[in-house]
Amino acid sequence: MKPKILPLPLLSILACGTSLAATFSVTPGQSIQDAIDNAADGDLIVIFGGSYSEELTINKAVHLTEAVGEDVIISGNVTISGVSDAPPFRGFDLGAGTTTLTVENTTGLAISGVTMDDLLQFGGSVYVSDSTINGRWSVDAYSFPNPDYNLQLPANHPDNSGKSR
């Protein structure tokens, strides 16, 4: 039997077809969670400026980012769960209506530049469990009068020297 030879263009599509990440765009009136649900690990979700009132569960390594020069306000609880080598979660405004930012069973996540408005007014909290926190970490310019309620870091491995334990 004579071996089959695939044409070069078809071979190149087959060779890299699974390695290309998709890009999803979310505009006001659309659902960020729908984009997360339809995305795969490594995909990019670009969120355009506006307010989004919805609960978010991020359970895969998708990159969420604001469109350049735009402000995104998310009003609803955000849970990041079960993600290995999680991309950064940065730059979002978690507005009134957000009561909890939860991170659990996740590694490699960096949360930076996230503004959390009015958490205490709504009984909110930041909860991190069974996750590894690498590098330096801090809570800046925010008062937690009852740390057991507002900031919880049980069963984690913070190490301010930059190494996880």
Image: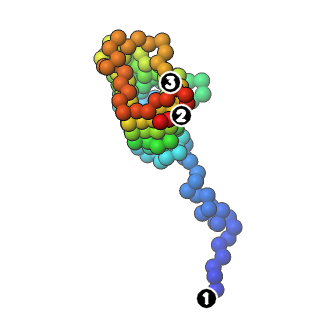
Is residue 18 visible to us here? yes
Q: Earlier in the sequence, mark 2 or mark 1?
A: 1
Report, in whole angstroms, how far the alpha carbon at label 3 lies from the one at label 1: 63 Å
Residue marked by disc 2? 163
Q: Residue 22: x, y in percent?
A: 54, 46
Measured Cα–Cα span from mark 2 to mark 1: 57 Å
Above or below, 15 relative to 30 = below
Amino acid under disc 3: Trp
| Residue 82 placement (x, y as % from top left) | 40, 42
Q: Nearer the viewer, mark 3 or mark 2?
A: 2
Q: Tell me if residue 80 can be seen.
A: no
Of the pair 142 and 115, the residue shown nearer to us: 142
Of helix, strand and loop, which one carries label 2? loop
Where residue 74 sits in the image (x, y, percent)? 42, 25
Looking at the image, tell me whether mark 3 or mark 2 is earlier in sequence order: 3
Element under disc 3: loop
Above or below: residue 112 compared with residue 43: above
Q: Nearer the viewer, residue 131 or 157?
A: 157
Mark 3 touches mark 2? (CB < 8 Å): no
Asked whether the beta carbons under mark 3 and mark 1 sit within 8 Å of each other, the answer is no
Per the image, the residue denoted by label 1 is: 1
Name the outermost residue toward the bottom: 1
Determine the residue positioned at 47% across, 47% down: 40
Location of residue 89 in the rendering, given as x and y in whole percent from the top left corner: 50, 31
Q: Residue at x 58, y 58 (%)?
A: 17
Disc 3: which residue: 137
> Camera-side residue: 18 or 151?
151
